[in-house]
Every structure is written in structure tokens, then in C-alpha cells.
Image (cartoon, rainbow, N blue to C red):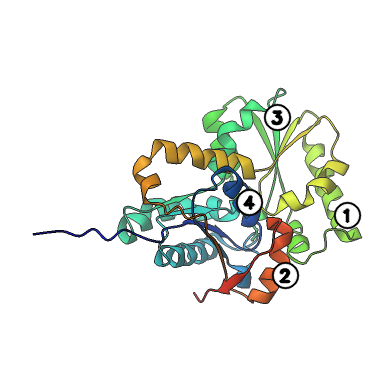
Amino acid sequence: MTIINHPKTYSPIGVFDSGYGGLTILKELVATLPQYDYLYLGDNARAPYGSRSFDTVYEYTLECVKALFDQGCELVILACNTASAKALRTIQQKDLPKIAPNKRVLGVIRPTTEIVGNYTKTKEVGIFATSGTVTSQSYVIEIEKFFPNIKVFQEACPMWVPLIENNELDGVGANYFVEKHVQQLLQQSQNIDTVVLGCTHYPLLKSLIEKHLPKNIHILTQGSIVANGLKDYLFRHPEMEARISKTKSLNFLTTDSTELFDGHASLFFGQEVKSKHQVL
Ligand code: DGL
């Protein structure tokens, strides 16, 4: 009897975010690992996730992960700190064994917390993130595991994502809210020498954050950290690496209007984007 193994023709790396922020991660993934196929899904219709409850973020994230699995993804990156903080562990431990035991879902918090200790000399680190990520305490818990002597100071910035999603980067509003949260973080400690932009939207505010932060404070963005983390993961998991298709394709899905998405996404991704609508 001959068993024919049909080669899987399309098995991209799925990259998920509540909206546009994950595109800052995708950009670095493609630059670092250009050989793979990528499929991005932005849940723009329900963004932002940052102030939503644990149950809602979990439910929305799981729906999106399933949609990416249905499109052929074997590996999905939650390129969203809020989803990584509130949904990743439950999806990995409870859902995957039932719905897709051979597939994998990874987040963005762990690769960031693994390396943060390489940057700080004062051992005091600041985290800018959404309210959801801050209240989950994920950064505090994860950094403690790798660097127990580092003190973590968190600042929730609930207005930053709405300002970015609404293309209000240059206005007085963005300047006001960035200055406010930078000051509030610095009031917690004068010794912070490293800050993490713990939301994938925030790289778009980097120059404004730099303007208000003292020059000696190092700003960590997650794109290249996550890309190097994935490179390392695929090296350590050759069985997964072999399952990812490699035709260098890039596809984009949004749960909201494709016109809106395409018009805004290039700001995050740095090149033109043509998306398709995803029904959940
Ligand atoms: N970009 C997402 C993150 O990294 C969250 C944005 C949102 O509030 O939906 O946390």
C-alpha cells in the first residue's frame, strides 16, 4: 500500500494583533527571517483590547488564533502584549491540547523579559504598556523569573493606543499624554535606566517618548527582540521549522474595513499593504 503524503503548500507563520501594532513586529520578522510565508491578522473591528477584561481578551484572541489555524498556520505569534498577558497561557495550556495539539502559539512578553537584564546597569526598569498588560503583572512576574534582582516600575498608558489608531501622532494630544506618562513613570523612581515599550503600537510614539525621557535612558522596542527570539525558537524546534512554508509571501487580514486597514497599515509596516476581510 502506498501512502501519499500531500505536501502542505501554504503554512505561513501567523501574526496576530488587536489592530495595527503587530505590524511593527511583522516588519522585523520579515527582515530577520525573510524565507518564510507570513499571514497577519488584525482584529481592528474590536481594537483596542488594552482596557478590556481578561475574559474578553481571551475570547477574542482565541477566535483569531483559530481563524489563523484554519488558514493553514502551524505557528502563531501573538504580536500583542495585551493578548500575550491575558490569553496566551490559557490558550497554550487549555485550548491547544484540545483543538490543535501539534500547533504552537507564542507571545511577545517572554522574549522581551529574557533579555531586559542585558541592558540595565542600575537594575531598575520601566514598562510602558496598556492597562490590561500592567494589571496582569506579566512583566513583573516574568522579569522576576529571569532577573530576580531587577526592580520593575510599570506605567499604564490607556490613551496611547487610541491616539495611534486614530492617527493623532503629531497633535498636541499625543504630546500631552506622552509627557504625562513619562513623568509619572519617572516619579516612581529616578534610577530607571531602561524602559520597555511593552505594547506593539508604541514604536510609533518612540520619537515623542525620546523627547520627554532623559537621554541616558535606553528605550527597548520589541520588534528585533521577538524576531531574534523566533529565530532561536525555530532553530531549537526543527520539526516546527520544517512545517512552515517558504515562498516569501506576505498576506494581511483585517476584521474591519480593508480600505481603512490598507490606508493606515503602511505607517506601521513601512510599505504598502493590501488586505482581505476576515469574518470571525
Ligand atoms: N498592541 C497591543 C499590545 O501590544 C495592544 C493594543 C490594544 O490596546 O489593543 O498590547
Q: Which sits earlier in the primary sequence, circle 4 or circle 3?
A: 4
Tag 1: amino acid:
Tyr
At which x and y percent is residue 218?
76, 33
Which mark is in front, 2 or 3? 2
Tag 4: amino acid:
Lys
Q: Which sits earlier in the primary sequence, circle 1 or circle 4?
A: 4
Q: Which sits earlier in the primary sequence, circle 2 or circle 3?
A: 3
Res 141 seen here: no
The Cα–Cα distance between marks 2 and 3, rounded to whole angstroms, is 39 Å
Tag 3: amino acid:
Glu
Q: Which mark is residue 30?
A: none
Which mark is in front, 1 or 4? 4
Mark 3 near ligand 1 (CB under 8 Å)?
no
Q: Which mark is residue 27?
A: 4
Q: Is residue 201 left or right of residue 217?
A: left
Q: Is residue 66 above or below residue 208?
A: below
The Cα–Cα distance between marks 1 and 4, rounded to whole angstroms, is 28 Å
Q: Which mark is residue 124?
A: 3
Kindly check if marks 1 and 4 are in contact, taking CB atoms under 8 A apart as contact: no
Q: Which sits earlier in the primary sequence, circle 3 or circle 1?
A: 3
Which mark is in front, 2 or 1? 2
At which x and y percent is residue 250?
55, 60
The Cα–Cα distance between marks 3 and 1, rounded to whole angstroms, is 25 Å
Q: Which mark is residue 176?
A: 1
Q: Which sits earlier in the primary sequence, circle 2 or circle 1?
A: 1
Tag 2: amino acid:
Gly
